[in-house]
Every structure is written in structure tokens, then in C-alpha cells.
Amino acid sequence: MEITVQWIRTTWTKESRGGDAATLRNAAPVGLLLPHNAAPFVHVVRMHEDDGFEPYDSREDLSKVDVQLREEDGRLRVFPKVKPLFALPPRKRRPPAVRLAPGQWVRWQLNYRFSSAMGIRGWTYWLDTFNVAYGPVNADVFLAEPPVFIDERGPLR
């Protein structure tokens, strides 16, 4: 069965944590139109503070995405990876994987906070949004409200 993944990563620094810059960051889309030839590749979208959160897209192979995808018993098991090194903010208990039936899709969001290795630079933040659909979809599928939404965002301080 066809699997469509859109992986959006929004990256910022403390400069975009308040005021007009935060308003611009919060307005960044969490779902975009799919390119005509998205599946079976991942539609990767990156948005950075330096570029005013303009989306830049590319394609990647399904094996390169930071989400576990496994077909079992006619359903798609979806579970984003969180490596312990990148586990800030703390996640006490992660929700279970989502099992999608054909025709369903999920939006799963996780956020992170990083400091430089020596603590010389300030904090860097990012938000990963995984939009995953199981079965054939239209190009505008991820523009709608998701039928399944998992919010693993934590406090970034």
C-alpha cells in the first residue's frame, strides 16, 4: 500500500521566542501541498529563522526519515524516533505508536532544544512535524485538520 510522508522541521533561536518574530514562527505551516511525485519518497520541508521561515522542500528516501513505519495486518504502524541525545525537553512517557487503517493519516509533533557543545552559543530550537498517510492521497491532504493528532511538544524554557 502507498505510504506518503511529509517531514517539516522548523528551526529557530531565542531571537524568535517572543514578539513579532515568534508570531512569524508560529504562523509557519504544519502541512503543505505535496509535490506531484511525493510517494514513495518523503517530502522534506525545512524552515529557518534566518530565512523568515520560508519553506524549502526536497525529497528523501523513506529509509532516511526519523519515523518508524511498519505495515502489519493491513495497517501502518507509525512511531517517530527520539534519540536519547536529543531528548530535551524531557519526555516522561511517550505515547504508543499509531496504527493507521488505509485512508487514514496522522500528524505527530515533537520539539527539541539544543545548546552548543561548549555552551558558547545560545540555545537552538526545532519543531518536527510528521504528516503520514496510508493509502492514496490528494496533493492537499495535509492542508486539512488531521484525523489523528499526537502532540509530544514539551516546555522549551
Image: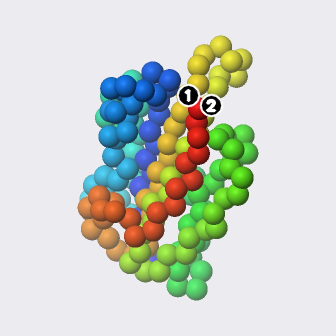
Q: Name the residue under label 1.
A: 124
Q: Which of marks 1 and 2 is nearer the N terminus?
A: 2
The local crowd at label 1, few if under 14, some if 14 to 19, many if 20 or more residues have their Cα within 10 Å, is some
| Res. 126 visible in picture | yes
Instruction: Say if 34 sits above or below 52 in the image.
Output: below
- The CA distance from mark 1 to mark 2 is 5 Å
Which residue lies at the image location 55% right of the left edge and 48% below the top edge?
153
Q: Quadrant of residue 111?
A: top right
**Residue visible at 50% across and 42% down in the picture:** 127
- Residue at 54% from the left image edge and 33% from the top image edge: 125
| Colouring style | rainbow
Residue 40 appears anywhere in the view: no
Q: Where is residue 152 in the image (x, y as percent from the top left)?
A: 57, 53
Q: In this orientation, which residue lies closer to the viewer: 102 or 151?
A: 151
Which label belongs to residue 114?
2
Total numbered badges shown on the rendered structure: 2
Across and down, in percent, residue 9 comes to 46, 42
Is 95 displayed left or right of 146 in the figure? right
Say if mark 1 contacts mark 2, CB within 8 Å.
yes
Q: Which mark is residue 3?
A: none
Q: Quadrant of residue 103?
A: bottom left
Q: Residue at x 30, y 62 (%)?
A: 144
Give percent across and percent down for residue 48: 41, 31
Element type at marker 1? strand
Q: Residue furthest top?
A: 120
Q: Which residue lies furthest to the bottom in this view?
A: 73
Q: Which quadrant: the C terminus?
A: top right
Q: Hey, what amino acid is under mark 1?
A: Thr
Q: In this view, does 24 lie to the left or right of 93?
A: left
Mark 2 closeness class: few <14, some 14–19, many ≥20 residues within 10 Å: some
Three-letter amino acid code at the position of disc 2: Phe
Across and down, in percent, residue 142 comes to 33, 60
